Image: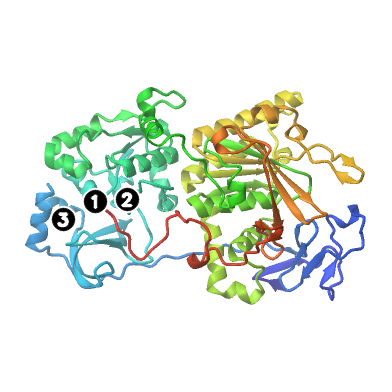
Amino acid sequence: MEINGYNIKDYNIYKLDTRAKKSTCPVCSEGRKKKSQKCLMLDWERGLGTCQHCGEVLQLHTYEKEKSIDYTYTKPNVKKIENSLHIKIIDWFKSRGITDATLSKMNITQGVEFMPQVGKEVNVIMFNYFVNGILTNVKYRDAQKNFKLYKGAQKTFYNIDSIKDSEKCVIVEGEIDAMSFVEAGIDYVVSVPNGFTAKGQINLDYLTDFYPYFEDKTQIYICVDNDEAGENGKKELIRRFGSDKVFLCDLKDCKDANEYLIKHGKEALKRVVLDAIPCPIENVLRVSDMASDLDEFYKNGVKNGYKIGLSSFDGVFSTYTKQFIVVTGFPSSGKSDFVDQMTIGYNMMYGWKTAYASTENYPQYLHVDKLVRKLYGSTPKYEDTKQKDWKECVEHINKNFFFIDYEDGFDLDRVLKKGEELVKRMGIRCLVIDPYNKIRDKNNLNASITDYTNAYLNKVDTFCKKHDVVCILVAHPTKPQNDKGKLIEPTFYDVKGGGEFYDMSPHGILVHRDYDNATVKIKVLKVKFANLGENQAHVDYCWNVNNGRYSELKDGNPIWDNTNWISTKNNPYEITKSLDLEFEQINI
């Protein structure tokens, strides 16, 4: 027997009445006054139970090992191609300092292609992308400087085969820049496929599949465009590759490598690589290393923090990267669910990818279901899982969320090491540790509570700073205290581990469920800088049982949102993440 494509291992593990649509909750009913109240909604078709009291989503069965999702790319089927270049194209490349020999070496061709920017077929230059000698993608350029990549083809670096057996490589921001270095006698050069942007998150999804090409490099030279977008891309490349192997090229008064070739010649361009300087020493800064940040500060003032897209919460809390956030609250208060709301918010707002090291959300496919429902907008029926809208949500989670899993148990050092690998390979910006007490720092188990907590948080803090990420750390408070039968709201000092949590943490957030009013309070226990939020401020939400989202209140009533967020027309977020479009407008 199977459900949603997964073979059932143990059926009905809670021994519930399979004819019923409601039941008591195995998680919270035993500790409630109304122990017999049937608060667990049963969906036998999907094998899930959802508690309307504590918010837990339970799997009713156990399953065999989950299936992997396979996403394939389109192979370019190029028609109307001409290997013999028109004299006008040859002359144009010559005006850019590129000779016939380099055009031949780089497999430049011409053809006729429909360009959506002009709405018709036109003559184009074709930059052909090869991987292991196989044509993998094509970028088309028309006479009006319009560009597009082959629809559905795999994105990769231009000229990636040239660095396969090299100990070093040069990374540039355009195909003609790569050809300029080849012209100068440096063959080990690659270009990103679609340039960089001046604002927002830099998307290097294509690096994931081709990271092994760079893993063994001893020297990686970054020679991107000398502008704001190039600076933005350079920072992300350094973050992904690590500063220890990166060298920075200085194009001086030129915008890019091709302009440098035209203005100064081949030998001078070659010297740009030979004279490249090592990336600034990690953890050591000079004023020159902070020049762009200093200029931005004087120009625009204090930088805004990153938000999650819930307007009332965003009004009292935001964060910078290189910091960690402690989320606390009593069991069944919705901590993990709110953390999911945060990570999805960061993803939809900024394109951030997240890695989870979570023993609370196990097995992982049940956690995936919670994330998908938040995007999808509702709890799907089995037939919905066959539809395009649902599959798009699953594919989005597959590309943007990763789940660290150790069958022999978690420990902090292993999690942080795997987090570092995910920064480099997948480009994550957020790491979730849930909960703190089950992902132990095994090297410090014999230390006092104070020393243990101090060492633990120092490791997390160092990880955040080194890799420019946000870490969300879920930590339980001490035993709940009651006042006349009502739970007393915990403070930051109540977190298990002592006062070190309050002293060392940049941020603290409380998730506290009000069972009487069916609301959840989200309270700022601590915020590092005044411009990022308001200490002790709080907002109230209602939890949407239909999809697990936290809903804003207006005049005391929840504003339910059951729309599909992956559908652009329904998406309430200001999406800045990169999308795989049919064409991309690129300036080179």
Residue 295 x/y as whole percent: 36, 32
Residue located at (24% from left, 51% from top): 588
Residues marked 2 and 3 touching at CB (< 8 Å): no
Lower sequence index among marks 2 and 1: 2
Q: Please state the horizontal and vertical placement of residue 426, each as a whole percent of the image.
A: 48, 48
Q: Which type of secondary structure does the marked residue at label 3 adopt?
A: helix
Q: Is residue 152 above or below residue 308?
A: below
In this picture, residue 47 sits left or right of residue 180:
right
Q: Residue at x 41, y 65 (%)?
A: 73
Q: CA distance from mark 3 to mark 1?
A: 21 Å
- Residue at mark 2: 195
Where residue 216 appears, as percent x and y from the top left, is 40, 39
Q: Which mark is residue 588?
A: 1
Q: Position of residue 89 (x, y in %)?
A: 11, 59
Residue 438: name its quadrant. top right
Dot placed on the residue nearer the N-terminal end, 3 or 1? 3
- Note whether 317 is above or below 6 in the view shown: above
Residue 402 seen from this side: no
* Viewer-proximal residue among 309 and 326: 309
